[in-house]
Image (spheres, rainbow, N blue to C red):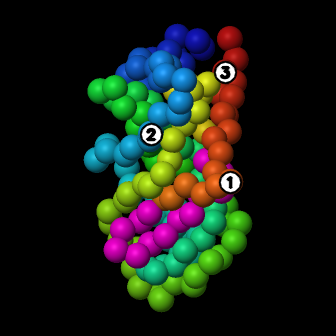
Amino acid sequence: MKKMYAAFESLFGGGKVFAPTSESSSPVTITSFSQPNVLRKKMEEGKMTHGGTVTANLSPVRLDMDHGAVVMYFCPMKTIEVLNVKTQGDGGGIPQEARIEGLSVPRRLKSGFYDLRNVELTSNGAMLVKATEATSWEFIEMGFPD
């Protein structure tokens, strides 16, 4: 079973491990391969619409290294847990483009799956995942039998 996990890991993680080298935190980015369509689908399932802003937990997201940068991927996301509705949407469609703002990972974190907790999620012009003072990353242990 470990060999199958290793194959799965290399398929989705490319074997690149995030291991920060600086004392400070590392900024997080997204790319065209981060699959924002998954974020959009989960926002629609949560009844969010254009113009809405919520505080939410995203679970799980994946962090990996890509060309020296820490990249977040939405592809494994199963849920958006809405903690607080700040602004109701206007009923319009959620934009296609995704952006992130202010997200960084402490140097102790590594590549893997995380619950991204207490972010501001907005859908006005673009889907925006924005860090708050309470934003945190909670590592998800992926237990696989031998």
Mark 3 residue element? loop
Which residue is under mark 3?
144
Between disc 3 and disc 2, whose residue precedes? Answer: 2
Q: Which residues are magenta?
A: 116-128
Amino acid type, residue under disc 2 in the picture: Pro
How many residues crowd around disc 3 within 10 Å: few (fewer than 14), some, or many (20 or more)? Answer: few
Mainly helix, strand or loop, the magenta region? strand
Mark 1 residue element? strand
Residue 124 position within the rendered picture, expressed as x and y whole percent measured from the top left: 40, 76
Which residue is under mark 2?
27
Which of the numbered marks, if any, corresponds to residue 134?
Answer: 1
In the rendered view, tell whether residue 8 sits above or below residue 69: above
Q: Which of these two is toward me, 141 or 121?
A: 121
Query: What residue lies at 62% left-to-right and 78% top-to-bottom?
Result: 86
Query: What residue lies at 58% left-to-right and 33% top-to-bottom?
Result: 106
In the rendered view, tell whether residue 102 sits above or below residue 52: above
Q: Can see residue 112?
A: no
Numbered circles on residues, count? 3
Which of the numbered marks, if any, corresponds to residue 81?
Answer: none
In the rendered view, tell whether residue 37 sits above or below residue 24: below
Q: Can see residue 116?
A: yes
Do the residues bearing badges 3 and 1 touch, measured as CB atoms within 8 Å? no
Residue 115 position within the rendered picture, expressed as x and y whole percent measured from the top left: 64, 44
Query: What residue lies at 37% left-to-right and 45% top-to-bottom?
Result: 30
How many residues crowd around disc 1 within 10 Å: few (fewer than 14), some, or many (20 or more)? Answer: few
Residue 6 position within the rendered picture, expressed as x and y whole percent measured from the top left: 50, 15
The Cα–Cα distance between marks 1 and 2, rounded to whole angstroms, is 16 Å
- Quadrant hosting residue 92: bottom left
